[in-house]
Image: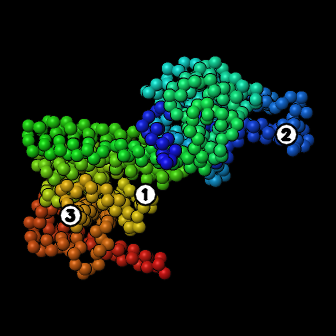
């Protein structure tokens, strides 16, 4: 039998924007946010202290006997403090974390809120109804660069109906109000009715959208329950999540709406799994092999016939513009992302960047291998465009730098293809003519666009590999498939991959030395088999080539290292020694770790 969560993921992914969320206090439980009832009872306890009385074991009973009425959230607040600013400050500690609470991860957006923000950013969720007073959802959305339309009062609901269209952003309907709103609904009487604009809004949502219910029992919110009960249309499925089997009102609502019940461990686990499953389906649906193969076939057709020169350029520019727009979208890839669960976000972005880059990467590889010199500027354009995204590099370092991952893949793909085709003039252009800006200066790709500038050690630590160079290994795996048509043998692929990384490292070191900087460049898988005088390493292969052809060596003829064999030998000797020293230190460290 198919897992009902899988069915839900299929429904959400294939019906983009059709499902609304109905969230209760269970979604904020792990953040330890108090409910409205919790706040009322805490205020009564504080009031009892001021009256020098003991309100336990039931503060609500003490309050009624003391003041002759049941405690009312709104009325109690208005009597405790008189002005709106004072009420705001009174309530703030219940919902906003202190420094200590923040360090403990309390009163912050939960994994559930962050997963929901991911679904909203991707356009799968557009409408959220919540009974919660807190602003954790708004905070999570803000971290994704999304400013939702929040409906928490009668006035806010007026005129919002036309906004519920496929072009709308995210709407949050806070049916019981917001903690900063003194009219927050809390008592049984307050929860019996909603203002007419709120009721009309709910009627339309329940009529037009599917529903995913989580963290809500269906008991206390009488008016919300009534709105669900009177909706006779069930064009989309209602999915009801709970940690326990449904009873009472929840069971009746599920039956009435012909809903599907899914038992979950907790809200955090559920929304994270839903986000992952929807993302997996999205990945599968993104540029599928046939579309990429068709694109590659078109490129091959265009590059062999000058009649298609303009068509070729238009096609390349079109695909690069599409990729540029996707990667630059700060709603999908926000830079100021919450540091909570940053590892999961890094993994998500790496996978999505790889998927989005696939069409342009295939073009660059095929064009670099099969094209002629007149096409070289097209492939350097692709890399330069993607290496210079809009805005300054800001936000969390890993995520800001990781935006250059698509450009790095393009540089690797074009570089390896040009080496396989023995087009060292093109390799020179890719490394030296592609200009890349960072926050300090502009420089050639050989200096500014390398693995360790784009994917630092923290990113390497989240990748599922035990390799000493995990980020390089990730690129090695990703590029194998798109390069298979032109490099069929795995041994040759490894040889060309190592050759590109090693030559890139030498060029970077050479440029650094010319500018008076330290001679050090990124290492890669090519260096781990290097223990002089071991035969067969890329270092030794190049030594043998230089001995054989001297100044006629192709990279020198193309202009790398200014065409000087002496300058090349000097930088190679210096780099090889540093690599050898580094590898020995790493192996020594590994032995110590084993002891």
Gap in angstroms between the C-alphas marked 2 and 1: 51 Å
Which SS class for mark 1?
helix
Residue 230 place in picture, x, y as percent: 62, 23
Residue nearer the viewer, 175 or 332: 175
How far, Cα to Cα, is label 3 from label 2? Answer: 77 Å
For residue 517, what is the image quadrant?
Answer: bottom left
Residue behind mark 1: 459
Per the rendering, the mark at residue 489 is: 3
**Observer-nearest of 519 and 332:** 332
Please name the residue that numbered disc 2 is placed on: 59
Q: Kindly identify the residue that appears in the image at 43 percent across and 57 percent down.
A: 459
- When the figure is inspected, residue 82 is found, relative to residue 265, above or below; the finding is above
Relative image position of residue 576 (x, y in whole percent) = 27, 72
In the shown orientation, is residue 76 left or right of residue 284?
right
Q: Which of 419 and 582 is in front in this view?
A: 419
- The secondary structure type at the circle numbered 2 is helix
- Is 394 positioned to the left or the right of 62 in the image? left
Q: Residue at x 31, y 43 (%)?
A: 287
x, y (%) of residue 62? 88, 37
């Amino acid at each position: 039998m198919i897992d009902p969560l899988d069915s839900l993921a299929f429904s959400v992914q294939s019906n983009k924007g059709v499902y609304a969320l109905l969230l209760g206090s269970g979604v904020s439980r792990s953040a330890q946010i108090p409910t409205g009832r919790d706040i009322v009872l805490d205020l009564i306890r504080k009031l009892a202290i001021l009256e020098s009385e003991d309100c336990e074991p039931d503060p609500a009973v003490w309050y009624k006997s003391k003041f002759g009425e049941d405690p009312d959230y709104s009325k109690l607040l208005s009597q405790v403090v008189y002005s709106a600013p004072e009420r705001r400050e009174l309530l703030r500690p219940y919902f906003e974390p202190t420094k200590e609470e923040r360090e403990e991860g309390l009163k912050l957006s939960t994994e559930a809120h962050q997963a929901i923000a991911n679904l909203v950013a991707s356009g799968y969720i557009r409408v959220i109804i919540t009974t919660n007073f807190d602003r954790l959802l708004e905070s999570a959305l803000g971290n994704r660069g999304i400013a939702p339309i929040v409906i928490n009062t009668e006035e806010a609901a007026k005129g919002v109906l036309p906004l519920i269209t496929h072009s709308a952003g995210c709407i949050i309907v806070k049916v019981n109000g917001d903690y900063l709103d003194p009219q927050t609904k809390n008592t049984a009487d307050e929860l019996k009715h909603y203002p007419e604009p709120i009721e009309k809004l709910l009627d339309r949502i329940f009529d037009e959208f599917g529903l995913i219910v989580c963290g809500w029992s269906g008991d206390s919110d009488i008016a919300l329950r009534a709105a669900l009960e009177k909706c006779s249309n069930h064009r989309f499925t209602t999915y009801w999540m709970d940690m326990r089997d449904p009873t009472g009102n929840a069971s009746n609502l599920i039956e009435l709406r012909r809903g599907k019940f899914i038992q979950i461990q907790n809200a955090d686990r559920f929304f994270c799994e839903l986000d992952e499953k929807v993302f997996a389906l999205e990945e599968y649906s993104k540029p599928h092999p046939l579309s990429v193969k068709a694109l590659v076939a078109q490129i091959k057709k265009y590059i062999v016939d000058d009649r298609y020169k303009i068509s070729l350029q238009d096609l390349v520019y079109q695909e690069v513009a599409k990729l540029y727009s996707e990667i630059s979208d700060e709603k999908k890839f926000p830079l100021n992302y919450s540091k909570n669960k940053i590892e999961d976000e890094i993994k998500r972005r790496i996978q999505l960047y790889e998927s989005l880059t696939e069409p342009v990467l295939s073009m660059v590889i095929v064009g670099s291998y099969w094209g002629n010199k007149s096409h070289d500027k097209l492939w350097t354009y692709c890399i330069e465009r993607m290496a210079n995204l809009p805005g300054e590099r800001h936000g969390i370092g890993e995520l800001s730098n990781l935006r250059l991952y698509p450009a790095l893949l393009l540089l690797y793909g074009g570089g390896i293809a040009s080496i396989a085709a023995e087009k060292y003039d093109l390799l020179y252009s890719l490394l030296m003519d592609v200009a890349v800006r960072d926050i300090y200066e502009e420089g050639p790709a050989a200096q500014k666009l390398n693995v360790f500038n784009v994917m630092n050690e923290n990113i390497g630590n989240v990748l599922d590999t035990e390799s000493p160079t995990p980020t390089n290994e990730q690129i090695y795996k990703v590029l194998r498939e798109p390069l298979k048509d032109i490099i069929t043998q795995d041994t040759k692929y490894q040889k060309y991959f190592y050759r590109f990384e090693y030559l890139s490292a030498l060029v970077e070191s050479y440029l650094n030395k010319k500018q008076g900087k330290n001679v050090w460049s990124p290492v890669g898988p090519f260096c781990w088999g290097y223990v002089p005088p071991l035969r067969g390493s890329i270092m030794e292969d190049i030594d043998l080539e230089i001995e054989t052809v001297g100044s006629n060596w192709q990279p020198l003829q193309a202009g790398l290292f200014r065409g000087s064999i002496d300058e090349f030998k000097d930088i190679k000797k210096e780099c090889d020694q540093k690599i050898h020293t580094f590898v020995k230190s790493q192996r020594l460290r590994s032995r110590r770790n084993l002891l």
